[in-house]
Amino acid sequence: MKPTNKKKILVVDDEPLMASSLEEALRKWNFDVTLCHESETAIGRLSKETFDLVLTDIRLPKLSGMEVLKRVKEAAPDTAVIMITAYGTIDQAVAAMKQGAYDYITKPFSLDEIRLCIDKYFKNQELQKENTNLKRALKEKYSLDRFVGQNYQIKQLFDTLQIAFESDASVFIQSENGTGKELIASAIHYNSARKGKPFIKINCASIPENLIESQLFGHEKGAFTGAIRTVKGVFEEAHEGTLLLDEVTEMPPHLQAKLLRVLQEGEFCRVGSNQIIRTDVRIIATSNCDVQKAIEEERFRQDLFFRLDVISVRIPPLRDRKDDIPLLCDHFVRMYAEKYAKPVRGVDESVLEYFYNYHWPGNVRELENVIQRSVLVCRDSDHIQLHHVLSQWPSMTQGQDSQSLSGRDMSIEEMEKRLIASTLKRHNYHKTKTAEILGITLKTLRKKIIEYGLERE
């Protein structure tokens, strides 16, 4: 028997004509209908089957519809019950609502009323299900279990984030570009007590100076040329939620003073208005610059920094946590191999060796992009090889350590020569170890040493 996606509805009514009309209409609307004329029979079916909805008359012989409602809620609390009532029993219907009934319909009623009530319930159920799934997905996406790293600095970061999750204090995230500042900020919001409230993001560096005040605090109609209507700012939109001020150190100095006032007093005025608006917002600020230098140069207010930096989050650059590169590579390979349906299982040792020597100015974001593109071009192996990387990212040679590769343009052969030379030197010309790391045979390595003139002097 094939499974069905039809919703199952139990109808309980002792009036044959009414019960048959309901059964016929519900089947026409593509529901799976079970009809019972007696409440005892209905209760027996409830003990054996699961129904999505029960439609029952309040007045039934022997056991009433109220008793059916009670039994439904005992056996299957998530099953909805709609009561059918005559005008004289509306008080009972209201009492049934208090005991868990979803709704009630009064006689006489049209079939359209029944359908509207049922459709409303199932639509609400779908919305609740979607909302639950979304919350679960967000919680999983921003769980600390999803963050990759075993480096001691990353472990310290996790400890700090746990404090931020459990607190409502302002957070200041400092790190270079590409380290995941926005991802960390999102994790803080979605793991906090404000997770069900708005999470609004604004980049202070990307908004023109003459518009940023309006973006932050809103404006009244006619406040300036082009203000054709009243607009809320992000502080109003984020009320009771979290506001991410990305690159906050780029905010103009005169607005820094206004921001400080909002943080201190929890109130502000829209541009063009004197009316005070109260706000309850948690602030997460980020910066990729040297904040202390910005303070010394008077580009950023020290008192504002102290107000924002209650919980201080420092994300280390990838060059300071290179021991995490294998873990990150495995993570990104799995992710993109699955996304693009590629049979790629990992990266070759020669690639890891190359990555260890690279400076990673673009941090984890750059590594992710390298792996993503390498997975796409990897057709001749189940592991990403060095030529897969270099064919897509020749500019990576400019970030190699001086002992390995220079910053000038060069051919693939020159890159290979320098990589072999640096690996030999690092392992004291141990050829077997070098060949193993580079992912080539000892015979091939010896041939390359002679070809490139790399014999030890």
Image: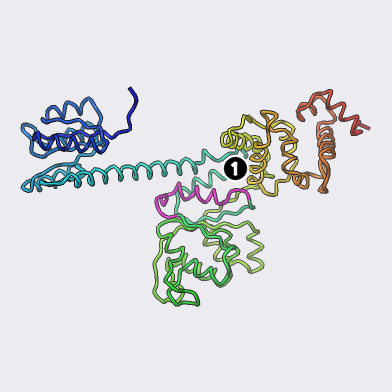
Badge 1 crowding class, 10 Å Cα cut-off, few under 14, some 14 to 19, many 20 or more, is some
Q: Quadrant of residue 352?
A: top right
Image quadrant in which the C terminus is located? top right
Residue at point 58%, 39% (across, down): 148
Find out whether residue 185 is within the magenta segment: yes
Residue in the picture at 49% in, 42% down: 141
Observer-nearest of 457 and 447? 447
Residue 230 lies, in percent from the top left, at: 42, 71
- Residue 38 location (% of width, % of height): 10, 30
**Near-viewer residue (429 or 168):** 429
Residue closest to the eye, 84 or 198: 84
Which residue position is annotated with label 1?
154
Region rendered in magenta? 178-198
User: Farthest residue toward the right?
Assistant: 457
Which percent across, then down, holds residue 6?
30, 33
Tell me: residue 379, above or below residue 141: above
Q: Is residue 126 left or right of residue 158?
A: left
Residue 44 sits inside the magenta stretch: no
